[in-house]
Image (spheres, grey):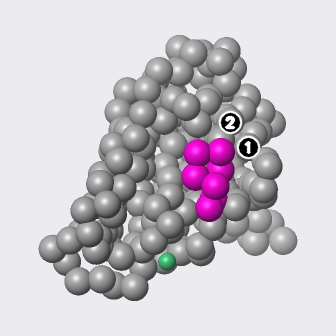
Amino acid sequence: MRTVSLAALGLLLAIQPVLAQAPRRLGVHVHGVTAVDIGLEGSTLQVTLDAPAINMLGFEHPPHNDTESKQIEAVLASLHVPAPWLEPATAARCVLADSRIQASGLSASAPSVGHADIDARYSFRCAEPGRLDHIDIHLADRYPATHGLAVDIVLPQKQERQELGQGEFRVMLAP
Ligand SMILES: [Zn+2]
């Protein structure tokens, strides 16, 4: 038994640094479900969205016309300002430091691949990271085709997955 638990401990120690970087899930694409990764390291909070484009746009193909082009542009531009729907606990005093938005399968110059994704990556600096006990994500209010969130959390004190369904928006981070 002792050998087994030591081996398990060794494995844990080996895995730990990798998990701390909040690994992205690969190949997850379920219409209506947006994958969210939340990671906190020191005073840096990272929130990453991986959304099937249909959740935000209502379609998943390169633009067929001017209206669709403008719609894609508008959605990608508005994602740079997450304040209306992404709210870390006020007490943690987090300020947005960086946002990166990426789309795949929506370029007019590339052939349609049948599906499309929109990724958003946000970095916050938090003055009181120890008080970050929740994050509210009102993504469904803004993009009603979002029916659920699959949230992976990597914190210094815990790692877990939370599934948020219709009407749910609070991700609990406190132990
Ligand atoms: Zn799709």
Up-down relation of residue 173 to residue 55 (above or below):
above
Residue 158 x, y percent position in the rendering:
71, 44
Contact (CB < 8 A) between labels 2 and 1? Answer: yes
| Tag 2 residue | 136
Q: Please give the label number shown on residue 169.
A: 1
What span is colored magenta in the figure? 140-146
User: Is 125 displayed left or right of 84 in the figure?
Assistant: left
The residue at the point 58 percent across, 35 percent down is 86
Left or right, 24 with respect to 71, comes to right
Q: Quadrant of the N terminus?
A: bottom right
Q: Position of residue 137 (x, y in %)?
A: 64, 41
Element under disc 1: loop
Determine if the magenta segment contains residue 155.
no
Q: Which mark is residue 92?
A: none
Query: Residue, x 50% and y 66% (percent of image)?
Result: 58
Give residue 66's position: percent from left, percent from top.
Answer: 25, 62
Is 76 rendered above or below residue 25? above
Q: Callout 1, which amino acid? A: Phe
In front of the other: 48 or 83: 83
Q: Is residue 141 magenta?
A: yes
Q: Point out the residue furthest to the right here.
A: 1
Give the CA distance from mark 2 to mark 1. Answer: 5 Å
Quadrant of the image occupied by residue 4: bottom right
Disc with the residue nearer the chain's start (2 vs 1): 2
